[in-house]
Image (cartoon, helix red, strand yellow):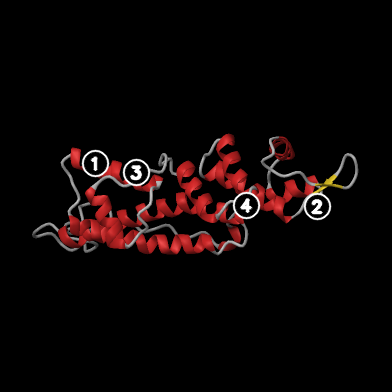
Amino acid sequence: MRLQELSEITRMPIASIKYYLREGIVPAGRLVTATRAQYDDGHVRRIRTIQTLRNVNGLRVEQIRAIVGLVDRGASRVEIMKALQREVQALGEPVPGRTEEGNAVVRLRGWPDVPTAARGALDDHLEEMARLGVPLPEDALEVYSRAVDLIAHVDVGDAASAADLDTLVTKAAAGMHMHSQLVLRLLALAQASRSIALYGPAPGPHTAHRVAGAAPVGVPTPSAQPPAARPQAEPASRRSSPPVE
């Protein structure tokens, strides 16, 4: 395909594609003349990767260059996933575990006991919770870790199904953001639902409450005036049509 077609398929402006070509983030096309090149599905996948890292994850150009550089060098999938966690989730550098709670959950779940950025971030968070006086009980940590292990199994399995490294990056990067947000929203809904089941719904416009001695909602009292008659609907033939866009 020509550059114009590549731009149309990916919805990336030609000027942007040329920029990433100059930066070496998108590989050069196959020259067919001195001034014209041909592009293929690999270029489409690379641009999709750039769009995800840029628009979904908000990464800077130098961060995108580092990640696609791993792809172009044929790095292992584990190395690419670790780089994505470091850049997308801003977890810092890989470090060994240092808290007893973190070490305990790694042993409990049978996770590899190796230095990772996620391990250091977990320890930072556990220490912060302890400083705030809200340490997580061991049984609660077991439940939390079991739940996220099941979620991670689905997420990593989906990314692992990618046929090529660019697709791996696109799936994993989108999942790290969108799936994490989905988990937070599902958790909020579950917490709200549990609270309602325990305490009952809070008063609001969507809950009908009866006052002692009052008639049920919708049943007029003897002193109440009947509702005014509604105007007759205009015949369909006389209604104006919506504007055509």
**Which disc is residue 74 wearing?**
4
Residue underneath mark 3: 121
Callout 3: SS: helix
Mark count: 4
Q: Secondary structure at mark 2?
A: loop
Q: CA distance from mark 1 to mark 2?
A: 54 Å
Of labels 2 and 3, the one closer to you: 3
96 over 217 or under it: above or below: above
Q: Pointer 1: residues within 10 angstroms few (<14), some, or many (20+)?
A: some
The image shows residue 161, relative to residue 101, as above or below, that is: below
User: Which of pointers 1 and 2 indicates the residue nearer the eye?
Assistant: 1
Amino acid bearing label 2: Met
Q: Is residue 181 left or right of residue 110?
A: right
Whole-percent x, y for residue 29 in the image: 78, 46
Q: CA distance from mark 3 to mark 1?
A: 10 Å
* One can see residue 219 in this view: yes
User: For the point 58% across and 35% down, which residue is it?
Assistant: 62
Q: Earlier in the sequence, mark 4 or mark 1?
A: 4
Mark 2, Cα crowd under 10 Å, few <14 / some 14-19 / many 20+, is few
In the displayed structure, does residue 60 sit left or right of residue 19? left
Q: Residue 127: which numbered mark, if any?
A: 1
Query: What kind of residue is marked 4?
Result: Gly
The one of 42 and 81 positioned closer to us in this rendering: 81
Q: Residues within 10 Å of mark 3 (few under 14, many from 20)?
A: some
Residue farthest toward the right in the current orientation of the protein: 33
Q: Amino acid at mark 3?
A: Ala
Does label 1 or label 2 sit earlier along the sequence?
2
**x, y (%) of residue 216?**
18, 63
Between disc 3 and disc 1, whose residue precedes? 3
Question: Amino acid under label 1?
Answer: Glu
Q: Can you tell which of label 3 and label 4 is closer to the viewer?
A: 4
Q: Which residue is mark 2?
A: 1
